[in-house]
Amino acid sequence: CILTMRFVCEDSMAINRARALSDGLAFDGLPMKFAWIRKYEERPMGYMAKLERDGAELDEYRYDLGRKWKDGTSDPNFDSHFKELSASMLKLKDFSDIKSVSTGNEKIGGSDFRTETFSMKRDGKSFETTVYLSAKGGKLLKFRSTFNEPVKEGIKDIVKQCIAKRTS
């Protein structure tokens, strides 16, 4: 499996930040590499950038749902939105046997995140998916990582390094 990092970027400066994500990140001694950027013209999603490496996928989303959010996880509407995300994960169409394994709070790169980890299957293969949710600069930041099971040692640390870079 390839570590696919797809980043929805808001402007051209964010493209350069997405490219810079791979700088200094390595797994099993091999550097991560920048693969591509895609601009979405049909809706205001901005840009999507992709980094690759063996073992996982990581998607990043930045959105505001039409309002300004307090930084971190303290916004009065944060809990209800996190519950909606959790419920939507349990209904993913491409996966089966989806179960919530754990929920918690983590500080990554100086930002507070609410997390939930799920186990699931697709085509007979087992996966572990974690959703990380926070708010910064008035927008929600959602990262979703998906790992083949068993999860390779060290890959979660690399994902957290990427999240820390994206939230700095």
Image (cartoon, rainbow, N blue to C red):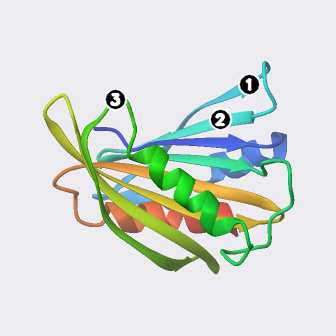
Determine whether label 2 and label 3 are within 8 Å by CB. Answer: no
- Callout 2, which amino acid? Met
Precedes in sequence: disc 2 or disc 1 = 1
Determine whether label 2 and label 1 are within 8 Å by CB. Answer: yes
Which quarter of the figure has residue 23? bottom right
Q: Is residue 133 above or below residue 7?
A: below
**Residue tagged 3:** 94
- Callout 3, which amino acid? Asp
Image mark count: 3
Left or right, 83 with respect to 64, comes to: left
Determine whether label 1 and label 3 are within 8 Å by CB. Answer: no
Residue 22 showing in the rendered view: no
Q: Secondary structure at mark 1?
A: strand
In the rendered view of the protein, which quadrant contains the N terminus? top left
**Residue tagged 2:** 48
Q: Is residue 44 above or below residue 109?
A: above
User: What residue lies at 13% left-to-right and 33% top-to-bottom?
Assistant: 124
Question: Could you give the CA–CA distance between mark 2 and mark 1, rounded to whole angstroms?
Answer: 8 Å
Which quarter of the figure has residue 101? bottom left
Outermost residue toward the left in this view: 124
Q: Secondary structure at mark 3?
A: loop
Q: Secondary structure at mark 2?
A: strand
| Image location (x, y in percent) of residue 139 | 78, 58
Residue toward you, 143 or 163:
143
| Image location (x, y in percent) of residue 20 | 64, 53
| Image location (x, y in percent) of residue 86 | 47, 55
**Residue tagged 1:** 40
Crowding near the residue tagged with mark 3, few <14, some 14–19, many ≥20 C-alpha atoms within 10 Å: few
In the rendered view of the protein, which quadrant contains the C terminus? bottom right
User: What residue lies at 16% left-to-right and 37% top-to-bottom?
Assistant: 125
Q: Is residue 57 above or below residue 128?
A: above
Question: Could you give the CA–CA distance between mark 1 and mark 3, rounded to whole angstroms?
Answer: 23 Å
